Amino acid sequence: MPPRKCYRCSSRATLLLRKTLASCSECACKAVEVRSKPLMELARGAALLDRNGFLDEMRGRGSSSSETTGESSSQSQDSRGAVALAFSGGPSSRALLHIARRLLNPPPASSASSSSEKDKGKRKPVDVTRIHVIYVDDSALYPSDEGGARDLTEDVRAIVEEEGGAAAGLDFVPIKFEDLFQGQEEGGQLVLAAGLGEEAGSTSTSTSRIRATRSSSNDLSSPSPLTSLRRLFSTLSPHSTSPRSLQPATRTRLETLHHSLLQHLLRHTAAVLGCSTLLLGESATRSSIRLLSTLSTGGGHKWPVEGSEAIWVDEVLVLRPLRETGGKEIAYYVRERGLTCLEPRSLLGSGGSIGGLTRDFLLSLEAGVPSTVSTVGRTGGKLVLKEEGSVQSLGETMIPYASSQQGGGWDERVAGRSGVGQKGDRLMATVLTQTQRWTWRAGSANANANSTRVVLPCPLCGLPAQQEAGRWREKITMRRMGTRGEEAGTGKADTASTDARGETVELDEMLCYPCLSLFLDAATANKGDNAGLVLPGHVGRIVEERLCYERAEQPTMATNGGGSKSVQTTGEDEVGDQLDLDAAADGGRRQMAAAAPGVSANGAGGGEHTEGHSQGARDEESVAILRRHATRRLDRSAMEGKIGGYLLEDE
Amino acid sequence: MPPRTCAHCNAAKAVLRRPKTGLLVCRSCFFLVFETEVHETILASNLFSRGDKVAIGASGGKDSTVLAYVMKTLNERYDYGLDLFLLSIDEGITGYRDDSLETVKQNSSEYNLPLKVLSYKDLYGWTMDDIVSTIGKKSNCTFCGVFRRQALDRGAAQLGVDHIVTGHNADDIAETVLMNVLRGDIARLSRCTEIVTQTPAGAGESKGCGGGGGDQEDEDEVDPASAAVDFLGIKRSKPFKYAYEKEIVLYAYFKSLTYFSTECIYSPNAYRGYARAYLKDLEAIRPSAIVDIIHSGEALPAKGATKQVQTTCSRCGYLTSSADGLCKACLLLDGLNKGVAGMGINSKPSKTAKLAATNGEEQKSRPSPQTLRAAASAF
């Protein structure tokens, strides 16, 4: 068989991209870079907007003085135009770092401030001033008796230096995972009051209240961030005595929590560093796996924000430039370019989880149907938030600036402002008009959306949360029947009333569906022994902001049917709303009767099924039916095969 | 170890662990909770109105058997005021459907529900045995699914019912969500978790769907338009949307209901099988995964997933969104009758349509060698 030729340059092919498509080494590498270029251009455009003061409004820096004066001080220019890049040391982020450095081409750190003057004519105009390479050290989460516990910060620093370091405009920013628990001064710490447990082994569709209380972070008894982090994760970790069958579920919880917190930490760090953009090295393969995993854990509603290839999450533009590139192509790129990267290590170790299962499933499917990953990726890219208007183009959400510049479109408003020519102006206009922004803060999206209900964030993951996620679970499982009284009557719920300011936050009314499942499952696994668990600092901040927002938007939310009460003083809990079986049955009958116009609640024509239909009568019916069916022939062995795991031993 | 008590009544001995919630429950509480969940689903979606005539799609399998039993029970217990019927479709699969239909007939007499059976042979002139012998096992589910959906509507129209309920359970819906993601079917993904679908108002006004009166049909050449039966406004719903398949089996087991449990003999190793296997693995890891996927699916509107404009089939009057004016069933039937079974299935219908047209017109349009030479000389 003759050697295959590259589909681009007709030279000898060395890489089989698909069954019918072969490529030479150089073309394959160029293709990876070309595919990521459009999103890198958005990063440049966002940096230009930042350098020209357009983003000040959404950062809360007051009116954009730079637009009115046309000038900005050199000091503020220094801190603007920076881009953050999440770097784990793995192949994807290593490839991303290399591509970002080449395409964004930041100036050396020492000359950043004056590059526009000194290097005029020698190099391209500067738009991205710096790339902050953020590495999150999560070694504290690994058991110390395993090899993975070593802090890899210095190894990662060496890789950044290999890419050029400060001389190439790269700033290495190492942070610790436990930094999540820093900065709790604003709203005080939130401490989990009680996660009411169920019987061990019960599954996540059980329902409980998740309450948290505020406590001062100045309290001497407050645990250190490291202790808080370890406690949070150990609450979800496999218990030494827990059955092996429950361990995959536990690993799934760890996986979900780790991912959610890491993403939030990265976005938060990028915002703190003043970066306009956060670059994530998520490949097409990884993105498809995450989409399926997210759907499987009930998080589909937030995928349009969580998985988007380009979206402003509040004030940071989150970009995934490698989302069109498969994992194998990235591995090939890293090898061909001779890039050093670290072995990816897994927090979960060996064993199953939803993430691991999904990865195996998708990769095996991809082996037979090669377009699976790209199809799933494209499907995910077409999903939108259910609440229309809660995601808008960046320009539409920048109300103060837009209103101050009446007349004309963004093309006209940015004309001549980039300082790098018409291409720069067009780039800024593109970012303003074509990138979407999800935000919920008063005065931004809501101001434009008029009557549209804003999707508020989940305090734990910081991404969109649906209202009343917990009630949805209760509604479809009838879990509350006969068990609500137990929950309300436990002593742990009362513990909340004695803390701090006597204020209890009903977290279950604020958390998104997957995060709520996390807490409920953890409460189940630990038999409710979660009291005193300190939550990451941002949880308290987001809760506080949500409460402020809800108070400010109360009239609007009331008309839209939203805005449930989230903070209760202890003792106001609705203990009395518990359902019992008879009440449910009677209520249901009344509702059906009421739904029929002109029919009385007693039910015309249904005299024997009136309100007096008692449990005893139903039992008699059941017995009668059972007797009628008692003589039937059944293939019981086949039925038992399907349900055997759920029958107790003596059945 | 002492016997464990029911988590609901705290009195009776628990006999099973609910697959959906993991709670230990006794037999009577399980029955009541299962039925109440279905009742709550019906109420929350406002599925029925008093006096509705409702057809229960009955195949004789576990889902439809339990659905018939539960619908009858709830109708009496909560005084829905519904007229219930059983509606069954005979696909003509020897050794499978003939046996399961016996189960349906047994259920009909036990539950005292009128039964209507429609057969593919009467409606379309083809049985599934005939179709499989013609096209093989590949893609035969497409024929069966399309024909069955239309047959149910026709049967419902003949019975004069307002509503068809089917036994699709939570597992089925979750599988469909996954499958639509895997194959990138955005339009279906956006609507596959809807509990009710309904014939759009105004559609099908020109003609009835026909096909209902089997005695009016010629077995060789079906002319469904000859029988005008109005099927407008027939709703379809899935009261078991949140019911786990395992709980349905448990319910049938403890109620000792009769159902037919054999898989269809023509069911191939279809793409759905991958989604099903994945879902079972997910459920093993995390039992709530099924409802979690449904929860995700309910919140998944997609860009550009607008509903297609529906018109009526120019031949039988059934709904279609096809630009050529033929419904899917008529297109498939055309293919079968003309010996081009791939028509309507293959991804490039234009080729098959051309081929069908060629065969249908007895090679009238095939160019002669002289014509070809003349055409070539023009270049």
Image: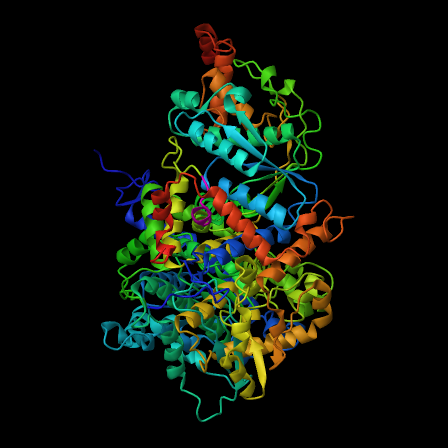
Residue A465 appearing in the image: no
The residue located at (61%, 63%) in the rendering is A416
Image coordinates of residue A206 in percent, x first then y, are 48, 65
Residue A609 appearing in the image: yes
Q: Is residue A53 above or below residue A380?
A: below
In this rendering, would A133 be left or right of B201?
A: left
The residue located at (49%, 69%) in the rendering is A461
Q: Is residue A50 above or below residue B80?
A: below
Image coordinates of residue A128 in percent, x first then y, are 47, 68
The residue located at (39%, 43%) in the rendering is A371
Residue extent of the magenta highlight: B251-258
Based on the picture, tell me whether residue A341 belongs to the magenta stretch: no
Q: Residue lying furthest right in this view?
A: A598
Q: Is residue B189 above or below residue B150?
A: below
The residue located at (52%, 52%) in the rendering is B242
Q: Nearer the viewer, residue A268 or A545?
A: A545
